[in-house]
Image (cartoon, rainbow, N blue to C red):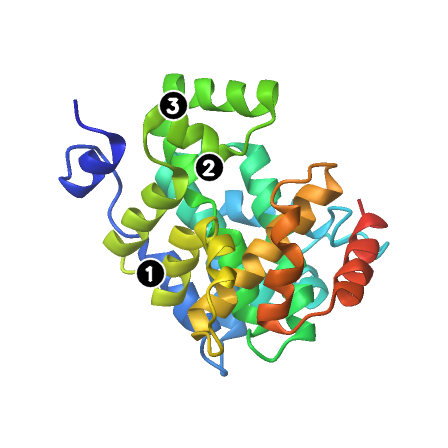
Amino acid sequence: MKTLINKIISDDIDIPSQPQTALEILSLIEDDNISLNKLQELMQSDQQISATILKISNAPIYNTGKSIKTITEAINHLGLHTIAAIVSMISITNLVTGGKADKTVIDHSLTVSKIASSLSNHTKKVSKEEAFIAGTLHDIGKNIMNVYIPDKYKRVKDLVFKEGKSFYEAEDEILGYNHCQVGYILAKKWKFPNQYAYVIKHHHDIIFKPKIDQTVIKPEEALCYLIRIADILSFQLEGISTYDEYLETLLDKVGITKNTFDKVKDSFSSRL
């Protein structure tokens, strides 16, 4: 019997073609002369995207006490690159899931992206924009699995919530593969920029790489380390201690102190 991975590779499953709009946005973000008008036009033409942006803009993690009522206000409030990254994630996720995305996965990805963006201010190894985008996309494989193999993925979630295992471990145990592998195959199929495909594939197994004596790390590895750190922090905010034992080694790899990590954690604790 073919796995979901094999079906995606061999086109035996009805995965949508690459999300051109989302890829255009990813390209726009990497352009210093990103077009505000083009981004506004794109968002305002899609009611679902507009509604989601306004909802996110008013969420506690982003809110500064002011009610955000228009797309223009949202862009001014969150910043152009943040908005573009969120729109990209919404576009990709909706395309993959037909609008049936798991809200908990979306919420977690947005939290990780915001934390990663904040942490990037304390290292020269990762840009703020790439940190935010990588955070929004890192768990895309979970939503694919949740939609295309819902019965099997329910067993995964049961194992996670009843026995306290990570999704990564529960997926491997029940399915023999995990959301990192599924997301990576789709990312390559859709020709995502390399650094984001790398993070999607390695944001769990990267925790074992700091043990290797490696004085120089590649940009995509630094980005992946940062997303893993943000993931750990996001879980800590939920009272989960997954992978805590690797934290200080990961922090060292991107040049962030534990004291700085704790300050960022405190700042997010006050927003949730």
Q: Mark 3 = which residue?
A: 174
Which residue is more in the foreground, 142 or 31?
Answer: 142
Q: Position of residue 213 (x, y in %)?
A: 47, 70
Q: In this orientation, does residue 43 appear?
A: no
Q: Residue at x 77, y 67 (%)?
A: 260
Q: CA distance from mark 1 to mark 3?
A: 28 Å
Q: Where is 17 relative to 142, above or below? A: below
Residue to which mark 1 is pinned: 192
Instruction: Determine whether 208 is above or below 152 in the image.
Output: below
Q: Residues within 10 Å of mark 1 (few under 14, many from 20)?
A: some
Question: Which three-letter amino acid code belongs to the residue tagged 2?
Answer: Tyr
Q: Residue at x 51, y 23 (%)?
A: 157
Give the percent coordinates (x, y) of residue 235: 67, 42
- The answer to which of 258 and 63 lies nearer the viewer is 258
Classify mark 2: residues with Cα within 10 Å, few (<14), some (14-19) or many (20+): some
| Mark 1 vs 3, N-terminal side | 3
The residue labelled by disc 2 is 168
Structural distance between the alpha carbons of marks 1 and 2: 22 Å
Q: Is residue 221 above or below residue 115?
A: below
